Image (tube, rainbow, N blue to C red):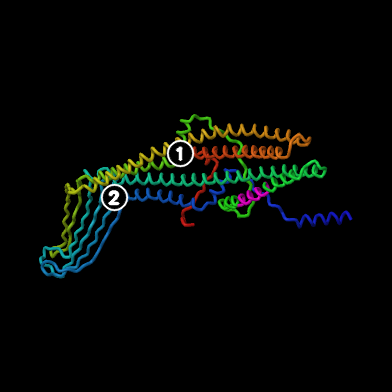
Amino acid sequence: MRYFLALLMNLVLALMPVCVSAESIRLNQLIQKVIDHYPSLKVAAIQVERARQENIKIENQLAWQLAAKGGISRNMSLFGTPTDRVDVSGNLKRALESGAALSFNAAINREDATTTLSPLQPNPSTISKLDISYRHPLAKGANNPAYTQAKEIADANKVISHADQQNRHDQLASQIIELYMAGITTHARITNTQQAIKRSQRLQAYIKDRSVMGLSEEKDVLQVKAQLSRQQAEYQGLKVIWEQQRISLNRLMGRDWAAPLELALDDNLQIPEQLHDELYQQVKARSPELVKVDQQLKLADAAIKLSRDAKKDGMDLLMYLGNQTYSGDTAAGSQSESEVFAGVSVEYNRGLDKSGYDAEIYQAQLDRGIALQNKKQIMEDLYYELSSLLAEIKANNMAVKAYKVSVNSEHKKLQEAEQRYKSGRTDTDQLIQFESQLSQAKLSYELQKIELNRRYHSLSLLRGLLWKNIKLPEYSFTEAGE
């Protein structure tokens, strides 16, 4: 018989559904899971990589460039003689960082006429030419502003892309903090309502016992029943809200929508001890918006320099040195002549209407003024945001301590009222009122702790400390679309 009961018990336990325990997640763990899963974050990483490639394109401006061409033709000479001609030429050039240009040129021309007009004239004849040329800008293009400013622009855009990526991470983290705290708040309300329901159920049982003995009135029973119904309805409503929040958080983390979830509040909060000015400098140093506006100032400066250079008159110094060889076969034998050639020249050009360049310079100056105003506004916003958070944290911390004392006082008050109620020295209305006040004090205490936690994490995000223990994902860009 004992063996049969043991076997039956094991069978019942085997058939019972397995309870899946909820995963307890803290804020930093939640952010890490969302960062690891969130697909749109790769867009910002791709933009950073794209900006990095721009530097490579600009460096390629100083690379050697090779050009070559060749062809065969038959033409009539000036004397009406059909002539076959072969032309081959090549060019190797490079722009220098100083703005100058260096070029190596080579060409070979071979002519073969069907009729030789003079026995002294080589036929076929070959002309080969090899020279080196150097062009140096003296005004427009001096020191190669197109290259140097393009590098400045590319570097600024790369930093802006990094700042945009950081800003996107910050915005996502801010949204996660709000969702996380909203979930924690809902959970605190659920817990508070559950405790209130338990107290009401105990009071209801106690009143029913007294009612049987004729010590309680019907209104007391109805009053407690109404309170219990209201609390149970509130509890069900809060469960609906939590289900919505849980599904949203699971979606952000890429988990199954029905996966159980438990949020844990951080208790080890460390209020910053630095002075306001020190914290303000820290906040400014890591602000992605300030980084962006500083780079926008560099972009405006680069545009001004480029427009001023484009407005200048063009004056280039051109030098060249080479050798030309003329060879061929004549009736008297082979003939070959070689001669060195060289030259120096100055080229000058000037645009007659420069109003377009003046407009470009003025536009860039206006862009710079806009960036300066934006920087001033951002710094002011950061100052007041930091000041507000510090003041709120200080007041919040005091409120937490005050509500903790209030909870203890309300608890003692309710205990004393319960003793008086049992001895018939107070009525049910006052007992319900005291119970409601205790419940409200406990909820206010928990909500103040949550608000302190939220402001602490918002300050941590503003200072950049939130990312200290978060590992940002690394992407491969062999297939950017994947």
Circle 1 residue: 286
Q: Position of residue 260 (x, y in %)?
A: 64, 51
In the image, the segment drawn in magenta is 231-243
Q: Residue at x 57, y 37 (%)?
A: 452
Looking at this view, is 76 or 280 the one in front?
280
Amino acid type indicated by mark 1: Arg
Q: Is residue 344 visible in the rendered structure shown here?
A: no
- Give the secondary structure at mark 2: strand
Relative to residue 119, is residue 109 drawn left or right? right
Q: Secondary structure at mark 1?
A: helix
453, above or below 259, in the image: above
Q: Main secondary structure of the magenta part?
A: helix
Q: Residue 372, position in %: x, y?
A: 35, 39
Residue drawn at x 63%, y 48% as measured from the top left: 238
Residue beneath label 2, please? Answer: 94
Q: Observer-nearest residue: 105 or 172?
A: 172
> Observer-nearest residue: 202 or 398?
202
* Amino acid type shown at disc 2: Arg
Residue 4: percent from the left, percent from the top?
86, 57
Residue 284 falls within the magenta-colored stretch: no
Q: Which quarter of the rendered picture does the N terminus lie within? A: bottom right
Q: Is residue 85 above or below residue 35?
A: below
Give the foreground label among 1 and 2: 1
